[in-house]
Image (tube, grey):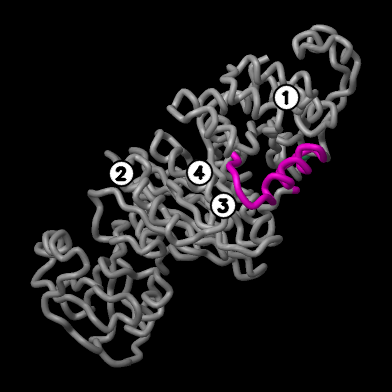
Amino acid sequence: MNDQWYFEIGDGNTYGPYPLEKLQKWAAAGNLMPTHRVRNADSSEWVIAAYVPGLELTTVIQDAADAKEHEKQTSGNAIGSLVRGLGHKNKSKKSTPVEPPDIVAMCNEMLKIAFKRGASDLHVDPERNITLVQIRVDGELETIRKLPKNLHNPVVSRYKVLSNMDIAERRLPQDGRFVHSFDEDKRKVSIRAACLPTTHGERMTLRLLALETEELTLNRLGMSRRTYDTFVKYASQQQGMILMTGPTGSGKSTTLYAALRHRLANYPGRIITVEDPVEFDIVGVAQAEVDSADKVQFNTVLRNILRSDPDVIMIGEMRDLESVDIAIKAALTGHLVFSSLHTNSAAGVITRLIDMGVKPFQVAATLRLCVAQRLVKRLCSQCRKPRNLTSVEAANLGNPTLEGSIIYEPGRCERCNERGFHGRVGIFEMLPIDDELTRRIVANCDEGAVSDYMRECNMPRLRDDAIDKLLAGATSLDQIFSALIW
Ligand SMILES: [Zn+2]
């Protein structure tokens, strides 16, 4: 009888009795975790499964009343007395107990849905009576599961185990990461996990980073031929500074990563990044994750990186003069520097740098290309519906001659999950710093003068690119009106 066991996974149910072999199987599969409790059929003592694979090590607790207190204290590390090699096989078939929910399969399934739908995040969000599992697709949240409250802790624990968090710690925020593979197509996704205690339980956020495939490439960003050629030309240079600008969520980092991949694929050289946080894993690039709120540490890491002799440096975002200063020195000493700044337009980059305290001649000597970017939803090509642009709309776009042009509205179909949109497309503005502009920067021109120069040279602005994408049927009128100020 003594190899018949019961266990609890924190959902309020007691499962069992099962032979030890079955518990070991579940433990090996990850469904039974170190903080879960087990007990023998002929004992009332609950034991904490302190070691997952195989249940070889467990902690003995005196009685059930002490169990909760003990659970708090042990934190999965301090093991009281150890019991090794629990029980022997002893086949006694009695009633067939109810199988516990397969938490591992459930967690994998939810990740798979997120992955298949191209979601950027998966949230496990505890509410008073249920737990919502939501995914973010193209910037919008969508509920994929409503779990009964009793499954909340087991699900959160499973994701904690995967991301190497302390599963016994439930009161402090934790971070972690893991690589998940989807066996059937052998694709891998890097996932960043963050766990935050809230009133109704722990909130788990899983951010699905870029695929470890070739999807993150420049020609997938939606650049026009001219924009693409300009970007590739500057991204291929040996030194200087390329700065991206745009609000949060405008796809700046995707473009920067794609640029790094382009370097990696086409040129030899060492690439190092300093980021907060690392949003995509790129094989072949040394990525340092530094909290940018800690300016001293951020800049120290940046200086150290320069000493390690990189050819290309990517700095997630420059927020103060000191980091800009380091970037400029790097750009002056034979490095190609990619980074981003907070401004509204490509023209604004120059004045922003000067406002931060950079000398105009330093800007002129280092800055090679400014890129402004926005992100809009891409129309589903299978269900989009054509119509004519009205005269009012054409006027609102600032170009009355466009009246009557064919544009498209979102439809509904299976491919886009009835949403009308499928993925996103970037809107770009590029400002290459040529000789004439260099002269004007040294002469201390303002943002208006830079804009005038862009017009003189017929460089496409964000609006021009947005209209091109509208007329090409890549996106809708509503999308470009909401992404840009007209
Ligand atoms: Zn569709």
Q: Is residue 357 above or below residue 258?
A: above
The disc labelled 2 sits on which kind of residue?
Val
Q: Nearer the viewer, residue 463 or 346?
A: 346
Q: For mark 2, what is the residue?
A: 296
Q: CA distance from mark 2 to mark 4?
A: 37 Å
Q: Which mark is residue 461?
A: 1
Is residue 339 visible from the viewing direction of this image? yes
Q: What is the x, y in percent for residue 360? A: 53, 27
Tell whether 196 sits left or right of 408.
left
Q: What is the x, y in percent for residue 485? A: 64, 17
Q: CA distance from mark 1 to mark 3?
A: 30 Å
Q: Residue at x 35, y 53 (%)?
A: 175
Q: Counting other residues with Cα less than 10 Å from the Cα at mark 4, is it few (<14), some (14-19), or many (20 or more)?
A: many
Of the numbered discs 1 and 3, the one sitting upstream in the chain is 3
The disc labelled 1 sits on which kind of residue?
Arg
Mark 3 vs mark 2: give the one in front.
Answer: 3
Q: Which mark is residue 82?
A: none
Mark 2 vs mark 1: give the one in front.
Answer: 2
Q: Residue at x 19, y 73 (%)?
A: 47
Of the numbered discs 1 and 4, the one sitting upstream in the chain is 4
Q: For mark 3, what is the residue?
A: 334
Q: Counting other residues with Cα less than 10 Å from the Cα at mark 3, is it few (<14), some (14-19), or many (20 or more)?
A: some
Q: For mark 4, what is the residue?
A: 134
Of the numbered discs 2 and 4, the one sitting upstream in the chain is 4
The number of numbered discs placed on residues in the rendered structure image is 4
Q: Which residues are magenta?
A: 219-242
